[in-house]
Image (spheres, helix red, strand yellow):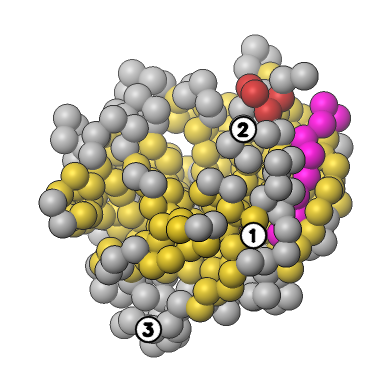
Amino acid sequence: MRLFVGTYSDKIHTLHFDPASLRLEHGTPTPGPGNPSWLEFHPSLRVLYAANEMRDGSVTAYAIAPDGLAARATQPTHGADPCHLGIIGRLLVAANYTSGHVTVFPLDAQGMPGPASQVIAHRGASLHQTRQASAHPHHVGVHAGRLLISDLGLDALVAYRVSNGVLVADGPAIGTPLGGGPRRFGVHPALPVAYVLNELHATITRYSTGAPGGWLACETVPVLPCGYTGGRSGAELAIAASGRFLYASNRGHDSIAVFALDGDGVPHLHGHVPSGGAGPRHIEISPCGNFLAAANQHTDRVTMFLIDTTTGQPHQIAGASVQKPVCVRFVAEYQAAF
């Protein structure tokens, strides 16, 4: 298996994992413009995009080669600190966290981004006086043909659709718990259910996505142990392809919360495992479903876990030193094939 690791440095790192020997080893790193904090794969081409999270933000497209990555194009986002990317149709969309802008890039037939065709400003605020004094788009995702942007500053998922090659607003925003700060969301692979990770509250809210009026909030559950009083910052969630388990990373507690999902997709907390370092900003499940990787930003450590697919429990098996890792992505088979 091959993994690409986004960082708060000037490099994208490549790691090679051997499931037989359980060894995690370094490949050749790829230099970049700076802070390639989020990595996004093209859905059908061997292309990787990096969000360069700087005040003068940009995105870079890389061709995926057998021995690493080759930079092909860089475009400015006209916003500050792009932290996430998503693709809908032939549009690449960047969420600029600090400036509150969403930037749209048209993609050509080779997956290369052209100059920005739209820069959309989110406006508003919510309860937290410092973290939510203005808009902060944080996650770009697609559900049921719509583009959804989770905005931590607005306590909302803002919806768009594509019309004549541009994004247009698509109805009212989906509300999230006030003061919670929605950071990430994920969709159940089989049920009409979605989950929103609220960073500031360190909670997960389950939504019914098949409701007549759109997304309907159900229960909200904590991702931290009962009685925990230390620092809290929910960072990432991952849903098993089987639809039986959900995982969430906790910064401060430095753990991965393990939830079992029942027949209605309701999450039931089964416990926590140490993340293998401090500041687990991102976690991801391997395409085969047997492994989970965690990027521990504050201790320069990427940790690999073996998942017990019966119980859902992750067991730490390997690790590698990487400077300030903040995103870890498994390379899918079609992207690695030549």
Magenta span includes 233 = no
Is 95 left, or right, of 206 in this rendering? right
Label 2: how many Cα within 10 Å (few below 14, some 14–19, many 20+): few
The quadrant in which the C terminus is found is top right
Judging by the rendered image, the residue that carries numbered circle 2 is 44
Q: Viewer-proximal residue, 73 or 252?
A: 73
Between discs 1 and 2, the one toward the N terminus:
2
Based on the displayed image, in which of its 4 quarters is residue 298 positioned?
A: bottom right
Q: Position of residue 230 (x, y in %)?
A: 39, 65
Q: CA distance from mark 2 to mark 3?
A: 37 Å
Quick one: which residue is furthest to the top in this view?
Answer: 20
Q: Is residue 268 visible?
A: no
Q: Viewer-proximal residue, 185 or 28?
A: 185
Above or below for 285 versus 299: above
- Which kind of residue does numbered mark 1 sit on? Phe
Between discs 2 and 3, the one toward the N terminus:
2
Q: CA distance from mark 1 to mark 3?
A: 26 Å
Q: Which residues are magenta?
A: 58-67
Judging by the rendered image, the residue that carries numbered circle 1 is 105
Task: Kindly identify the residue that appears in the image at 71 percent across and 54 percent down.
Answer: 113
